[in-house]
Image (spheres, grey):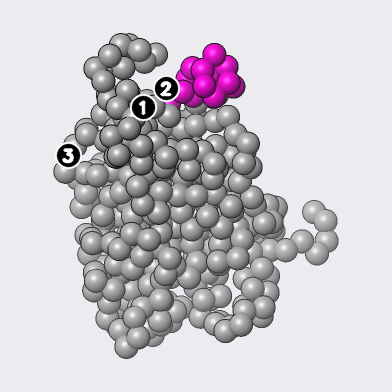
Amino acid sequence: MPKGRTTFSKFIIEEELRASQPDPHLTALLNDIQTACKFIALAVARGGLNASEAVATTTNVQGEEQKALDVIANDIMLAQCEQGGTLCGMASEEMDEPYPIQAEHRRGRYLLAFDPLDGSSNLDVNVTVGTIFSILRAPDGVCDPTVEHFLQPGTQQIAAGFALYGPCSMIVITLGSGVHGFTLDREIGAYTLTHPSMRIPEHTREFAINASNERFWEPPVRHYVAECIQGREGVRGEDFNMRWVASMVAEVFRILVRGGLFMYPRDTKDLGKPGRLRLLYEANPMSMIVEQAGGAATTGRERLLDIAPAALHQRVPVILGSKSEVERLIGYHQAYDRGEDLAFDAPLFNARTMFR
Ligand code: AHG
Ligand code: MN
Ligand code: MN
């Protein structure tokens, strides 16, 4: 290993030294998160060696299958992050209500919202999963936070990031000035800066969507995907590739490296759910990262980071990635909402898609 490389620990200390209002509590919290991610990386890497952990066990608050590793990862984050005196509460996909810091620990000024294992349906097939996190400041005077204190728009995030447990273990982070990627060097036990100042490439020919939901999509999304599939012969004049990992962490990392578009759009599959992904611990942190890397993130009709959350586990439509592609989709939504783009709403369209 070359000498003098920047570890995650060194990076966050340097960021603190550079900050106009340095806060060692934020540095300490980020340090606890990286330690938690190392423990989760280890647990995930054991795979089938701990056979029972990949098996579905329970159902979480959102009625979804909860694997033992979802719960283990959740417990690791709670245990590692509550002792530092930096947090006054945590919220997670796997917990119905916010978790109060136990009485024996000091309380700090930050709130942590996280998805302990994103993409956990991929655990039993050995495909990349990850942890997503969002750091907010607790409102002044609050040391015993309730749900309402977590309901802050994504623009209020102090920092956001995600860990990847794939062929390499990585952490990608933003503190509001760029996006930086670190790869776990297992020989020295340190996340090491390998992807400084990541920028989403603008020219892209890849898109990611779960095409099995096509019959439930809104016309603007059908319009976009149909044009991609028409490739060189269609209005885009170029061939596209489609990708679907079913782990948002892996899709967002690919977009940071190669560009492209990721969509889990509004659909009519379950009218009680306006989207699949959760705002506070999936859409918001990923949107901050994508915007900080020069991309864009929207519901199709609203910038994701501007949404005023109404519930802890609120779901939202998500469209994010290379800016020009996101803007194209926003344009299709606007045209449709103005009644100007009805072609893709017509029954005839269904006969023209490649999926039938
Ligand atoms: P989680 O494992 O935390 O529930 O999140 C999975 C999410 C996201 O990572 C992925 O993009 C999507 O759900 C996969 O959805 P499909 O099952 O429809 O492919
Ligand atoms: Mn998830
Ligand atoms: Mn999850």
Residue 24 shown in magenta: no
Whether disc 3's CB lies below 8 Å from ligand 1 is answered: no
In the foreground, 250 or 276: 276
Q: Label 1 belongs to which residue?
A: 222
Q: Residues within 10 Å of mark 2 (few under 14, many from 20)?
A: some
- Magenta: predominant secondary structure element? helix
Residue 83 in the image: above or below residue 33: below
In the foreground, 339 or 142: 339
Can you give x and y, in whole percent of width and height, for residue 203 in the image?
A: 63, 36
Question: Residues at badges 2 and 3 in contact (C-beta under 8 Å)?
Answer: no
Query: In the rendered image, which quarter is residue 96 located in?
Result: bottom left
Question: Residues at badges 2 and 1 in contact (C-beta under 8 Å)?
Answer: yes
Q: Amino acid at mark 3?
A: Leu
Q: Amino acid at mark 2?
A: Ala
Indicate the secondary structure of the residue bearing disc 1. Answer: helix
The quadrant in which the N terminus is found is bottom right
- The answer to whether one can see residue 216 in this image is yes
Q: Amino acid at mark 1?
A: Arg
Give me the residue at 62% from left, 79% from top: 19
Q: Label 2 belongs to which residue?
A: 226
* Cα distance in 3D space between marks 2 and 3: 24 Å
Q: Outermost residue toward the right?
A: 3
Tell me, for residue 154, which label it has, or none: none
What span is colored magenta in the figure? 225-238
Query: In the rendered image, which quarter is residue 55 located in?
Result: top left
Relative horizontal placement of residue 246, taking residue 59 as reference (left or right) = right
Q: Label 3 belongs to which residue?
A: 271
Q: Outermost residue toward the left?
A: 272
Residue 35 in the image: above or below residue 204: below
